[in-house]
Image: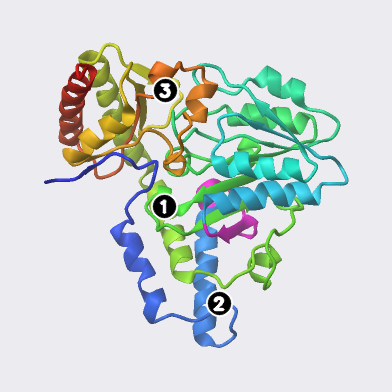
Amino acid sequence: MKVRYFDHAATTPVSSTVLQEMLPYFELQYGNASSIYSIGRQAKKAIEQARRRVAEAIGAKAKEIYFTSCGSESDNLAIKGIAYANRKKGNHIITSKIEHPAVLNTCKTLEKQGFEVTYLNVDPKGFVDLEQLANSIKSNTILISIMFANNEIGTIEPISKIAQIAHKHNVLFHTDSVQAIGNIKIDVPNMGIDSLSMSGHKFYAPKGIGALYVREGIEFEKIQDGGHQEKDKRAGTENVAEIVGLGKAIEEIYQKYEVYNEKLQKLRDFYIEGVEKLIPTAKLNGDRVERLPGNANFSFPNINAQELLLGLDEKGICASAGSACSTGSSSPSHVLTAIGLPANLTEGTLRVTFGKDNTKEDVEFLLKSLEELILKLGNKD
């Protein structure tokens, strides 16, 4: 049975060209980048090339890029690091109710340490309330952290406007861009972004590697002790092979940006139109226009998402009910709750996210399978 994969927001396969560039650093060029002999210097050179590739992709300087293990670590390092470094100025942080758990749980930890956190509301399409944002800023506000694009419903936030509000009040702005990298053109200085998180496995690099951008001049503290790697901000022997993979992947995806995203958008729109035609009761979540090119999130009334996913899996279709990081939770999606979705819709939500290897034929098979299953599950009683 052919497997049709529609869960690229959860993870992507490693690109073959990325893998080929990584392979020598597992066996032939295995040196520790902190060593001064030749194979150590080769490893260091490879890391710095990857750093330049990441920087060029988002309009940053190479010295503003720090390698981490994933997007969650990048979020932790950015938010905690900036909070700790600015304790003397203030202890107030602003974020939104639809952030990834890596941001929300980091903020909850900071609250236990004496920081104050404001969680902004969003409208029914998932947009942050900019008026509430401006009114929430106080004299002790030190950081605003709002995701670039939502991982569940795909809504793209007005990042430049948020940055302008932050800077008008002399507040730093961080954005979790894990879902945005490769899907949106990002220029950190022009957009006013002070700090940005990313994760390689969302854009065809391997799992276990991420990066953090912090604008030059911004103070932030390290959050783990050890050696002095990554300019003394992130201890631990560098994962050279995966750093190389991240650098290659981000360069590659932006070189193919227009073709890649045009394809995703066409597949997305074809799927959305198909669902709305075949299943008129379905509700599209998120904004119809300002959304990630490969994201389509629908709720189906009185349908159990887990049963729907199992039915799709039997047909070789991989999709999700929401964030992969929330799988196993008995609580309804915090994102769907925040946009005001009623219980009979939150329980029947399907997220489909397209990637570079999907075809129109795959989507046609998905639509046919989905129609059959919705009819079957809706009539099971």
User: Which stretch is magenta?
Assistant: 56-69
Say whether residue 54 is left or right of residue 284. right
Query: Hey, what amino acid is under mark 3?
Result: Thr
Q: For the point 49% across and 84% down, which residue is it?
A: 39
Residue holding disc 1 = 201
In the rendered structure, which amino acid carries the disc numbered 2?
Ala
Relative vertical location of residue 17 with respect to residue 192 in this rendering, above or below: below
Q: Residues within 10 Å of mark 2 (few under 14, many from 20)?
A: many
Let me know if residue 135 is in the magenta part.
Answer: no
Q: Secondary structure at mark 1?
A: helix
Q: Residue at x 32, y 19 (%)?
A: 300
Residue drawn at x 66%, y 49% as measured from the top left? 78
Considering only order in the chain, which callout, 1 or 2, is on the residue closer to the N terminus? 2
> Badge 3, how many Cα within 10 Å: few under 14, some, many 20+?
many
Above or below residue 345? Residue 246 is: below
Tell which circle, 3 or 1, labels the residue nearer the N-terminal end. Answer: 1
Q: Earlier in the sequence, mark 2 or mark 3?
A: 2
In screen coordinates, is 60 left or right of 82?
left
Q: Report the front residue among 233 and 346.
A: 346
On the image, the x and y values in percent for residue 330 come to 45, 34
Q: Which mark is residue 346?
A: 3
Classify mark 1: residues with Cα within 10 Å, few (<14), some (14-19) or many (20+): many
From the viewer's side, name the closer residue of 304 and 83: 304
**Kind of residue at badge 1:** His
